[in-house]
Amino acid sequence: MKKFVEAAEKQAEAGTIDKATKKRFVVELLESNGITVTPEINAFIEAAVKELDLAEKNAIGEIGKIFLTPSRPRRTKY
């Protein structure tokens, strides 16, 4: 499930699919692999999306820490 959600995200970023149709893309991938999308499967899709969003936010937060850490005072040469 997670891989299908990641694939939809990449396709949307590349402009291959519209961002509004990412979930439909995942559903079509599942159905083309013989998986019927039930309310339970839909919940797994939503959980995978949330997991991906959280991972992205955490990564951005970690990158932000690199740039926001206080720098050491510069020493001036005399």
Image (spheres, rainbow, N blue to C red):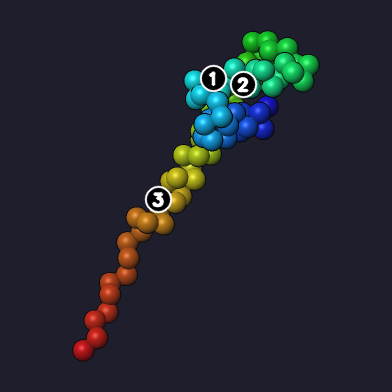
Residue contact at pointers 1 and 3, CB within 8 angstroms: no
Percent across and percent down for residue 70 are 32, 61
Find residue 34 and report its image quarter: top right
Quadrant where the image shows the N terminus: top right
SS at mark 1 in the image: helix
Residue contact at pointers 1 and 2, CB within 8 angstroms: yes
Residue indicated by mark 3: 64
Residue indicated by mark 2: 25
Percent across and percent down for residue 74 are 28, 75
Q: Residue at x 32, y 65 (%)?
A: 71
- Marks 1 and 3, how far apart in space? 30 Å
Amino acid identity at mark 1: Thr
Residue indicated by mark 1: 21
Amino acid identity at mark 3: Gly
Q: Which residue is drawn at 59% across and 25% down?
A: 47
SS at mark 3 in the image: helix
> In the image shown, does 50 or 16 lie closer to the viewer?
16
Percent across and percent down for residue 43 are 61, 17
